Image (spheres, rainbow, N blue to C red):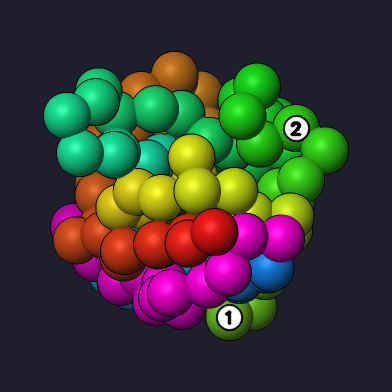
Amino acid sequence: QVQLVESGGGLVQAGGSLTLSCAASGGTFSNYRMGWFRQAPGKEREFVARIRSIPYYGDSAKGRFTISRDNAKNTVYLLMNDLEPEDTAVYYCAAGPNWADRYDYWGQGTQVTVFS
């Protein structure tokens, strides 16, 4: 069983930056594909980015967000630059097996609010 704990959310002005962290425990971190998702009020959950060894981004994240991982620290990060009010959402960290396109474990989420 893998436990994921996100941190780093908060209130930020448009154009600003935030870095989210997700600390994993209870499994072999390097064996997992790690992803970030977000859900805004009244909207469906949206894929943001994922990483095994190479990052991959959803359209909303391309050019502004950077996902990275530190296997020694069992942590995945999401650096978010040039934030917009439309980025306001609860951001979730997720983990899944490297060999399958699914996520089996989810964190509790961290709120990001961008004001103009």
Residue 59: which disc? none
Front in this rendered view, residue 87 or 80:
87
Residue that extends furthest to the front in the rendered view of this protein: 116
| Horizontal and vertical percent position of residue 29 | 49, 61
Whether tag 2 and tag 1 are in contact, CB under 8 A, the answer is: no
Distance from disc 2 to disc 1, alpha carbons, whole Å, reads: 25 Å
Residue 62: which disc? 2
Magenta region: which residues?
A: 1-15
Compared across the picture, whether 70 is left or right of 24 comes to right
Q: Quadrant of residue 50?
A: top right
Compared with residue 96, is residue 1 higher up or lower down, i.e. above or below? below
Q: Amino acid at mark 2?
A: Lys
Q: Which residue is mark 1?
A: 73
Magenta span: helix, strand or loop, mainly?
strand
**In front: label 2 or label 1:** 2
Q: What residue lies at 71% left-to-right and 60% top-to-bottom?
A: 15
Residue 4 is covered by the magenta coloring: yes
Q: Is residue 113 visible?
A: yes
| Horizontal and vertical percent position of residue 14 | 62, 60
Q: Amino acid at mark 1?
A: Lys
Label 1 packing within 10 angstroms: few (<14), some (14-19), many (20+): few
Mark 2 or 1 closer to N-term?
2
Front in this rendered view, residue 38 or 11:
11
| Horizontal and vertical percent position of residue 85 | 50, 48
| Quadrant placement of the C terminus | bottom right
Q: What residue lies at 82% left-to-right and 38% top-to-bottom?
A: 63
Compared with residue 98, is residue 111 higher up or lower down, i.e. above or below? below
